[in-house]
Amino acid sequence: MTHSVPLLDFGAQYYLNGSGSAYVGGVWASSLRYRESNDQFYWIGCVDFSHTHIFTAPGSVVMEPGAPATQWNGHPAINNCYYDCGLLIDGDDSMYVSYGSTTINVAKLTADGLSEDYAQAVYTSPNNTYIEGSRFYKINSTYYILVTVPASGEWVLKSDDIWGPYEMRILADARRRMDYGIMQPSSMHIPEDAYPGGRVPVLAPITWSTDGWPSLDIANNTWPSEIPFPIETNKTVKPLTGKDFFRGPALGPEWEWNHNPDTDAISFDQTDGGLIMKTASVTDDLFLARNTLTHRVLGPASKGTFQIDLSGIQDGDQAGMALFRDSMAFIGLSKASDELTLQYVDGLLLSNSAGNNWETISNGTVKATGPTFKISGNYTNIWLRIDVNILPAFGAPAEIKRYANFSYSFNGNDFTQLGSPFILSTSWEYFIGYRFGLFNFARKTLGGQIIARSFELESISTEIF
């Protein structure tokens, strides 16, 4: 959302400024559709299980390369949580939303698509089986709502009338999971619970029966290793791998701040290139430190490398590179007086116990130390690297584990591993997968800074782990 909306302006907890945090909060399975009649994109989603927010933007602007984020406009929230919602624009231009868990509801929106007209329940699962992740379609005058039984199966709800009654058939079940689990489907597109990496979009070919029921085109309950690409296009996208030199004037869409950033503490080096990150928090808790910059890990295995200019770091500062999630580790530098010490720290942990609001229960333990040095000459820049295997292991036997290795270099070529391999968590409760994270926070006073000169992402083989 932060690529479209300037701020996650949903409460003080989204700022890490002393009012708590929003881990495992925010948007849940939102929906995006284009409405041709008024040239508007509509984004709709429930936030914090409370209210539903709607943002709109003119399609003629959004679809232009480099469209500015300020083109998205927020509207008054709807006082109802459209949980895991799917937006549908019908043939007569009416707008509807499917949403809910166990009982699926349909809401008709007002003519402008910005508030609720009325809503009613249209389907309740048999035996109160838990279902969620509604995705709403109209195909050949028939209405379809695709729902998921979490990490177990996908159902199709089908009706000739938008208000039902809806019939149900199973689209996929646990025997047809890709590796270890799939979640929240849309037509031809099934996001997979692929922890430790997070949810991964998977294209699934379907066929249609003569009476309008879709089925997965899978033989012998085996997911195909290759699928013909369904769309021909001459459009290109930026490769996922490569090197970013942070030349500005803005970060690319592959970057995400952990919570809303303190923009006064970040800028671009207009002379030599690089992202300047001043300390924005005085804390001992990386989970509560502002301005941690994150980048999704590329699967099935990849390595990320930051080149960091340390010349502006000050006494008491902690800077480094983390494998960021609710259970994480980092390689970093701690400055005391005029000396920097390399450290490998693991065991940082958020609580996922009910009622604890994902509070920090451990700031980690130093498991290994590297050189202690002063900033001068060859010791102004350091390269920090994480090699990580995120091959899906959600629901796998306990003996199947995924690992990450942390290393450093003073010349960008010769790397030394620090600490033992870190065992990744494959739990689902945090929902977001592991991300590379760059951080810089103060333990004493604000005023220090680092400069991220570059970040390089490379694919690697899972066989090295």
Image (cartoon, helix red, strand yellow):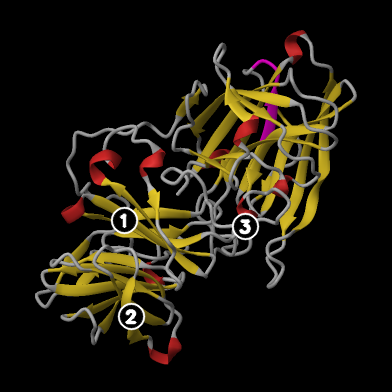
Q: Is residue 385 visible?
A: no
**Circle 3: element type:** loop
Q: Look at 17% across and 65% down and name the residue there.
A: 207
Label 1 environment density (alpha carbons within 10 Å; few <14, some 14–19, many ≥20): many
| Mark 1, residue position | 42
Q: Position of residue 247 (x, y in %)?
A: 50, 20
Residue 148 position within the rendered picture, expressed as x and y whole percent measured from the top left: 39, 72
Can you give x and y, in whole percent of width and height, for residue 26 in the image? 53, 59
The reply to whether dot 3 and dot 2 touch (C-beta < 8 Å) is: no
On the image, which quarter does residue 303 sit in?
Answer: top right
Q: Amino acid at mark 1?
A: Tyr
Residues drawn in magenta? 406-411
- Residue at mark 2: 119
**Three-letter code for the amino acid on which mark 3 is drawn:** Tyr
- In this image, 336 relative to 333: left or right? right
Q: Secondary structure at mark 1?
A: strand
Q: Say which residue label 3 marks.
A: 23
**Residue at the image point whose x is 72% and y is 68% from the top:** 356
Magenta span: predominant SS is strand
What x and y, as percent, mark residue 267? 58, 26
Quadrant position of residue 120: bottom left
Comes first in the chain, label 3 or label 2: 3
Q: Toward the viewer: 2 or 229?
A: 2
Q: Quadrant of residue 408?
A: top right
